[in-house]
Amino acid sequence: MKNDFLCPNCRGYLSVGDRIVFTIKKKGWSGGILLLSPLLGDYSYENHSSYKIDPGEKFEFHCPICDFDFSVKGTDNLARIIMMDEAKKEFTVVFSKREGERCTYKISDIKIEEEYGEHAPRNLDLLSTSFFK
């Protein structure tokens, strides 16, 4: 099953080949490209060898098309994008912006459909206030 990933702002496709493409930024650094696995719960990534990502380091995730900041309102720790499955059904995918923090959520309009990663319980309260008011 192949899913597509989209920017919530411009709805541009973030999926290229077998990766999701992001622009990442942090204070004091102009940024770079990060490629993530499209498989929810797979935390592998690729980046250019000229920049090192340290364990626990946090980044801002942006759309490489329109530069939209994917941060979830109400928290500084999470980012979100849209996932569209083969049936064209859309979900919000929320993930940690911190390297090594393994938490990802697949969210429908009414509930968290699935959660992935050993750190997923850490952010459930934040998601409840951000998505289900």
Image: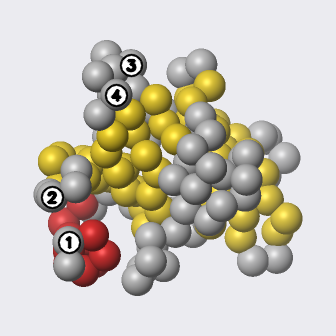
Amino acid at the residue labelled 2: Ile
Going from the N terminus, do you reach mark 2 or mark 4 first? 4
Q: Real-space Cα distance between discs 3 and 2? A: 23 Å
Q: What element does badge 2 sit on?
A: loop
Q: In the rendered image, which residue does mark 4 sit on?
A: 88
Determine which of the numbered discs, if any, sits on residue 43 in the image. Answer: none
Q: What element does badge 1 sit on?
A: loop
Q: What element does badge 3 sit on?
A: loop
Q: In the rendered image, which residue does mark 1 sit on?
A: 132
Colour pattern of the rendering: secondary structure
Going from the N terminus, do you reach mark 4 or mark 3 first? 3
Q: Real-space Cα distance between discs 2 and 4? A: 17 Å
Q: Residues within 10 Å of mark 3 (few under 14, many from 20)?
A: few
Foreground pick, 41 / 62? 62
Q: What element does badge 4 sit on?
A: loop
Going from the N terminus, do you reach mark 4 or mark 1 first? 4
Identify the residue at image location x=40%, y=39%.
83
Q: Position of residue 63 (x, y in %)?
A: 66, 52
Q: Residues within 10 Å of mark 1 (few under 14, many from 20)?
A: few
